[in-house]
Image (cartoon, grey):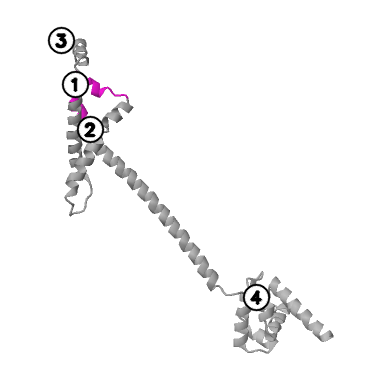
Amino acid sequence: MSTELQTAFQLSSPAGIVDTHLLLILVVMVVAGALGGVANYFLADRPEQAGRRDWVKYPLLGVVVALTAPLFLNMISSTLLEGARTRPVDFFTFAGFCLIYVIAARRLMENVAQRLLNQLDQVRREVGKLQQEKQKEEEARVESPVVEEPREVLSYNDVEILRALAEERFVCGNLAAICERTGQAREFVSHRLTVMKGLGVIETRINDKNVLHWVVSARGKAVLDDILTAQDDRKSA
C-alpha cells in the first residue's frame, strides 16, 4: 500500500476510534519524562538523607516537563511528530528528545534560579553595605564633638602664645624659645600648642631649608586680630 493511501486511510478513520499515533506519543512522553526524572534525581545535588518524596517528585516533574515537548517542537516548526505516522523509528527519536529535554530543562531552571539567587544576594549585600555606611555616618555624627569657636576657648595665655608665633617663627619642637618669650611652663605650652593646632589657629610649615616651624594660620590671624581689637576697644573705653 502506498504512502498516500495509508495517509488517506488514517484520515478517514472513524472519529470514535482512539488515534493510536497520539496514544503512542503520550506513552512515549510519560515514560521518557519518568526516566528523565529518575536521571535528574541521581544527577541532582541532594542532602545525604533524601526524603522519600524525592522518588515521586523528580519523575512527576519529569513527566510534566515532557508533556511540554510537543509545544516546543511546534514552536520550532518541527515535523517529527507527524513524520512518526509513516516512520515508526521517529518514535525512538522523539523518546530520546523528550529524555534530553527533561534533563536539559532541569539544568536550565537551576541555572536561572541560581542566577536570580546570586543577583538577590548581591542586592542584599549592597543594601547591607549601604546600611552599614549610613549607620557609621550617624554614629560619627553623634560622636563627633561640637567644634567651638577658637575665640571662645582661647585664654589669655593662648593669646600670648599666638602673638609670639605671629611676631617670630619658632622651630617646631623648640619649646624653650616659646617658653622664654611667653614666660609660661613647658608642659602648658606643649599642651596648648596641640589644642590650638586642633582648632586650626596655628599650623606647621616647612621653609626653604626644610626646617619645620610653628606659624599662625589665616584663621588664627583673624582670631588674633579680633581679640586684640576687642582689647584695644576696652582700653579706650
For label 3, the residue is 1
Which element type, helix, strand or loop, lies under badge 4?
strand
Q: Which residue position is annotated with label 1?
A: 16
Q: Is residue 219 left or right of residue 25?
A: right
Quadrant in which the N terminus appears: top left
Left/right of residue 143 with respect to residue 25 in the rendered view: right
| Residue 99 pos. (x, y %) | 21, 34
Rounded to the nearest angstrom, the CA distance separating label 4 from label 3 is 114 Å
- In the rendered image, residue 90 lying in the magenta stretch gets the answer yes
Query: How far apart are the two marked residues, 3 and 2, measured between alpha carbons?
Result: 31 Å
Circles 3 and 2, Cβ within 8 Å, touching? The answer is no
Looking at marks 4 and 3 on the same chain, the residue that comes earlier in the sequence is marked by 3
Report the quarter where the C terminus lies.
Answer: bottom right
Q: Secondary structure at mark 3?
A: loop
Vertical placement of residue 158 versus 11, above or below: below
Query: What type is the residue that disc 1 sits on?
Result: Gly
Q: Secondary structure at mark 1?
A: loop
Q: Nearer the viewer, mark 4 or mark 3?
A: 3
Which of 14/207 is in front? Answer: 14
Q: Which residue is mark 2?
A: 98
Circle 2: residue type? Cys
In the picture of the structure, the residue carrying the numbered disc 4 is 213
Mark 2 residue element? helix
Which residue corresponds to the image point at 24% horizontal and 33% vertical from the top-left? Answer: 67
| Position in image of residue 2 (x %, y %) | 18, 10
- Residue kind at label 4, given as amino acid type: His
Query: Residue 31: where, in percent of width, then height?
Result: 17, 34
Figure quadrant of residue 215: bottom right
Q: Residues within 10 Å of mark 4 (few under 14, many from 20)?
A: some
Q: What are the residue bounds of the magenta stretch?
A: 77-94
Distance (Cα) linking label 1 and label 4: 110 Å
